[in-house]
Image: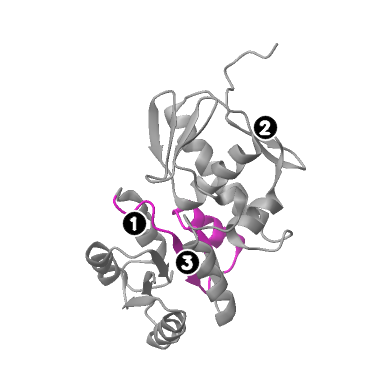
Amino acid sequence: MSKILVTDDDTAILELIKINLELMGHEVICAENAMKSYALLLQEKPDLVILDVMMPEVDGFTLAQRIRNNPDFANIPILMLTALGMLDDKVKGFNAGVDDYLVKPFEIEELKLRVRALLRRGDSLLPSLAKPEIYAIGDIILDPDNLSVTINGKSVKLTPTEFDIINILMQHNGQIVQSSVFLKEIWGYAEDDDVETVRVHVRHLRAKLEKIAPGSKYIETVYGGGYKLNPEPNKQKH
């Protein structure tokens, strides 16, 4: 059983989500605003956060950023649930550190699918998402317990989605990975779904790798194809 924190100023939606997630066997904690939500986060340490965007005083984007900026909660998956469904809104959510984005009105079965996908971190049935004890290729070392990546002795924390992306790239080790593969295996989306979802998360992952290994291009974009990992970008090829 997982503990899920749901934040929405609409009490009817809160109750709907609470009932259905409890029927799935989860423990559900509810908050009507961002301030209460963050207080409950500190107290309860949930396994998943579901949050609305348009709330009084503090919006969901700001709350998501605050969660991600706290190293104690950097690993918690965040599902944004909102009526703001434009591409720019989704990008803003992903830039705030959100792992997935579901637009209102939504089907309960779709919500359940997204929740299952986010909670399967660490217990995935998909081989490419299986998290080894320590996984190393070239300069890169992954630590699944801390959701971190180390390059040449320097480490940085990743979000669950960022970790899954680099894990899949390492599993394919130099082979091109289509965006559709990430969409299917990480989010459970159809292969022709929102490719921008992948682009934004890859961009954030690259920025973190650049932070600990300036000037090194570990993830290459294959235009029209997808992405591939270069585990030793500074090593001359013969």
**Furthest residue toward top:** 238
- Identify the secondary structure beneath mark 3: strand
Please tell me which of labels 1 and 3 falls first in the chain: 1
Q: In this rendered view, identify the residue nearer to me: 185 or 214.
A: 185
- Magenta residues (range): 72-100
Instruction: Mark yes or no: residue 67 visible.
Output: yes
Classify residue 192 as left or right of residue 183. Answer: right
Residue 175 position, x and y percent, is 71, 36
Residue designated by label 2: 174
- Looking at the image, which residue is at 59% across and 60% down? 187
Question: Looking at the image, which residue is at 42% across and 88% down?
Answer: 12
Q: Quadrant of residue 87?
A: bottom right
- Amino acid found under the numbered disc labelled 1: Ile
Decide: few, some or many residues near mark 1? Use Cα within 10 Å; few <14, some 14-19, many ≥20: many
- Labels 1 and 3 touching (C-beta < 8 A): no
Q: Is residue 183 left or right of residue 159?
A: right
Q: Which mark is residue 236?
A: none
In the displayed orientation, state which residue is furthest to the right.
224
Q: Identify residue for label 1.
A: 67
Mark linked to residue 80: 3
Number of numbered discs overlaid on the protein picture = 3
- Say which quadrant the C terminus sits in: top right
